[in-house]
Amino acid sequence: MNEEKIRADIVKWGRSLFERGLTAGSSGNISARIDGGYIATPTNSCLGFLEPDRLSKLDLDGNHISGDKPTKELPLHFAFYEGRSCAAVVHLHSSYATALACLSDTDPADAIPPITPYVVMRVGTVPVVPYTRPGSADVKARIAAIVADHSAALLENHGPIVCGASLDAAVFAIEELEEAAKLAIITRGMQVRHLTPSMIADLNATFRLR
Ligand SMILES: O=C(O)[C@@H](O)C(=O)COP(=O)(O)O
Ligand SMILES: [Zn+2]
């Protein structure tokens, strides 16, 4: 949780996610724990062009200490930090996960069908959290209702959010969530073989990163 390393990693991952088209314009936000607080992306910043010294520094209560004004989604990020043991939170507007968040027939309790092992191992079951306006503190109660059992969610009509035990883990998980959402969309209406409950239990027992 070295601050300089976290700042460099947020810039590195932000650029990588942006350049691969996983979030566009000034959408998305990233935060990570450091000793005594957090580093977060500034509001209205483009993840592709972050500067380490301009990232927002917060104390343990989320108060802004230095750097540019933080993302307006701090209530969303803190709902994960307060509800679960995690070290980083990543929110994107990636296309396929966001598409699932917009489809009215997505299962709100289990938005990503378990059709490959990796999504079970890295992400787990993904609920859809009812719509709140971006930046609204109302999202806190909605996340609080699911966060004990889930490290990822789809924000209804908005996009995916994931937390992880490290920034790398959170990024890998949201990338896998996007890939699994893509598979779910492109195989819609086809005869898809799902992993069975016993296959999922075996994966969870063997691999699941909590
Ligand atoms: O969708 C939104 O407006 C936010 O959730 C978002 O993605 C970017 O907001 P900022 O981090 O405040 O720029
Ligand atoms: Zn957003």
Image (cartoon, grey):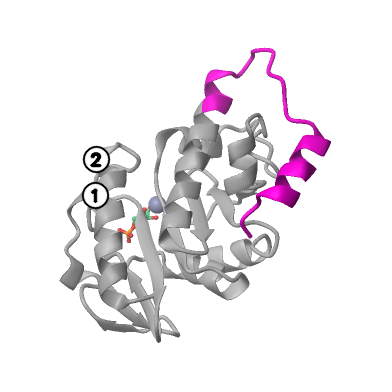
Residue 159 seen in the current view: no
Secondary structure, mark 1, is helix
For residue 104, side relative to residue 14 (left or right): right
Instruction: Quadrant for the C terminus, please.
Output: bottom right
Res 38 label = none
Quadrant for residue 144, please give it: bottom right
In percent of width and height, residue 114 lies at: 67, 34
In the picture as drawn, the residue positioned furthest to the top comes out as 190
Comparing 198 with 91, the one in front is 198
* Residue carrying label 1: 15
Residue type beneath disc 1: Arg
In percent of width and height, residue 36 lies at: 40, 86
Q: Is 184 located above or below residue 60 in the figure?
A: above
The span from disc 1 to disc 2 (Cα, nearest Å) is 6 Å
Residue at the image point whose x is 34% and y is 80% from the top? 58
* Residue carrying label 2: 19
Residue 21 seen in the current view: yes
Quadrant for residue 3, please give it: bottom left
Residue at the image point whose x is 59% and y is 38% from the top? 118
In percent of width and height, residue 174 lies at: 47, 47
- Say whether marks 1 and 2 touch (CB < 8 Å): yes
Start and end of the magenta stretch?
A: 183-210
Residue type beneath disc 2: Glu
